Image (cartoon, rainbow, N blue to C red):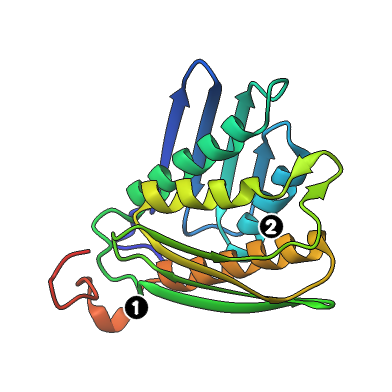
Amino acid sequence: MKKNGAPRQASLHRATKETDIRVDWSLDGTGQGTVDTSIRFFDHMLDLLAKHGFFDLTVQAKGDIEIDEHHTVEDVGIVMGKVLHQALGEKAGIKRFGFASVPLDETLAQVTVDLSGRPYLVYNVNLPDRKIKTFDLGLFEDFFQAFVTHGGLNLHVNLQYGRNPHHIMEAIFKALARALDQATTLEERLSGTVLSTKGSL
């Protein structure tokens, strides 16, 4: 649903000596993801975010991955956070809060989000193995921290249990997608106002 027929979307290009990243994000999409970061497992997670959040999301990133994947993963989080913030505008009419509990075989992940404008990350994820091939799964905490800081949201990521590290991260990203979809949905009963006693978020 769009507010006054205007699309809720934003784009941003950010280039540094370490990375060159472009993100286009439409909140009122159909789940179309076009992602290329040259880090295939990261691409897979962002594709899941688009599909299960019903977002149209394009992420194109080039980085110094011959040195380390950290810069690319963190900087994508920075740009995605800024684009989400821009796409939400004044946040008029959004439900603001979202929660999802997602299973994947032996794994259960829960994600809670508040698009409050107050950045804070709680990340309770104990991984049995930090590597998928050569990719360090610990970098996802850096991604979420950058996303939260620049998106202005309160994000709680809680792994209830799980054994397979691929299942764990996949359940987390699916839960994030579902929670963000809820939080960004427009609530007709708000009549275009902001869900806050302060009058702004």
Residue sitting nearer the eye, 186 or 100 = 100
Dot placed on the residue nearer the N-terminal end, 2 or 1: 2
Q: Which residue is found at the position 82% from the left and 38% from the top?
A: 134
Q: Residue at x 35, y 72 (%)?
A: 96
Instruction: Specify the farthest residue to the top.
Output: 17
Q: Amino acid at mark 1?
A: Glu
Of residue 153 and residue 163, the one placed in the foreground of this image is 163
Element marked by disc 2? helix
The residue indicated by pointer 2 is 48
In x, y percent, where is residue 26?
Answer: 48, 51
Q: In this image, 152 relative to 171: left or right?
A: left
Looking at the image, residue 105 lies above or below residue 85: below
Q: How many marks?
A: 2
Q: Nearer the viewer, residue 5 or 133?
A: 133
The part of the image, by quadrant, that contains residue 174 is bottom right
Q: Quadrant of the C terminus?
A: bottom left
**Image quarter of residue 6:** bottom left
Residue 187: mark: 1
Q: Give me the residue at 46% from left, 75% from top.
A: 98
Query: Disc 2 marks which amino acid?
Result: Leu
Are the two marked residues, 2 and 1, in contact with CB atoms closer than 8 angstroms?
A: no
Residue 200, image x and y in percent?
17, 65
Q: Label 2 vs label 1: CA separation?
A: 25 Å
Name the element at disc 1. Answer: loop
Q: Is residue 181 left or right of residue 82?
A: right
Instruction: Choose mark 2 or mark 1, whichever is in front.
Output: 2
Quarter of the image holding residue 177? bottom right
Q: Residues within 10 Å of mark 1 (few under 14, many from 20)?
A: some
Q: Quadrant of the N terminus?
A: bottom left
Horizontal side of residue 85 vs 103, given as left or right = left
Q: Residue at x 57, y 77 (%)?
A: 100
